[in-house]
């Protein structure tokens, strides 16, 4: 029982910092992958090569019609970058 209480307390204590790191990672992943896909014209699968070490948990998906890439950090965060002509890839507003 004590172990469960400690685990819940730790999860509550670290939730905000973990979520902030996840949002930063998802935003970075979406922006880099969108640029790779729609500015450079590479296949989405090759865009992971441009990621920094430690980004293995970030999942990528694309919407070819919207010219966007969404990066998801499981259970914690999700961010989309959209290609805009003349501006490149732009992140959607962060949701709090």
Image (spheres, rainbow, N blue to C red):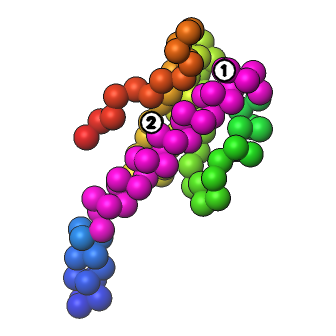
In the image shown, does 72 or 91 lie closer to the viewer? 91
Q: Is residue 86 left or right of residue 6?
A: right
Q: Is residue 55 left or right of residue 36?
A: left
Label 1, residues with CA under 10 Å away: few <14, some 14-19, many ≥20: many
Q: Tell me the number on the disc at residue 5.
A: none
Residue position marked by numbered label 2 in the rendering: 79
Q: Residue at x 71, y 38 (%)?
A: 47
Magenta residues? 14-42
Prevailing secondary structure of the magenta residues: helix
- Residue farthest to the bottom, as pictured: 2
> Is residue 89 located in the magenta-colored stretch of the structure?
no
Q: Is residue 45 left or right of residue 6?
A: right
Q: Is residue 56 visible?
A: no
| Quadrant where the C terminus is found in the figure | top left
Q: Residue at x 59, y 54 (%)?
A: 55
Q: Residue at x 48, y 24 (%)?
A: 90
Q: Is residue 26 visible?
A: yes
Residue position marked by numbered label 1 in the rendering: 38
Which image quadrant is residue 32 in?
A: top right
Q: Is residue 5 left or right of residue 81?
A: left
In the image shown, does 66 or 47 lie closer to the viewer? 47
Q: Secondary structure at mark 1?
A: helix
As measured in the structure, the alpha-carbon distance from the residue carrying label 1 to the one carrying label 2 is 17 Å
> Is residue 23 located in the magenta-colored stretch of the structure?
yes
Q: Is residue 82 above or below residue 4?
A: above
Name the spot of residue 38 as percent of width and height, x first: 66, 20
């Amino acid at each position: 029982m004590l172990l469960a209480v400690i685990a819940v307390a730790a999860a509550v204590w670290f939730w905000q910092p973990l979520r902030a790191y996840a949002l930063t990672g998802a935003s970075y992943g979406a922006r880099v992958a969108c640029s790779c896909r729609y500015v450079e014209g590479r296949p989405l699968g090759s865009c992971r090569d441009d990621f920094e070490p430690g980004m293995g948990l970030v999942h990528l998906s694309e919407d070819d019609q919207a010219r966007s890439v969404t990066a998801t950090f499981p259970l914690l965060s999700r961010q989309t970058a959209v290609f805009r002509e003349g501006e490149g890839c732009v992140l959607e507003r962060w949701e709090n």
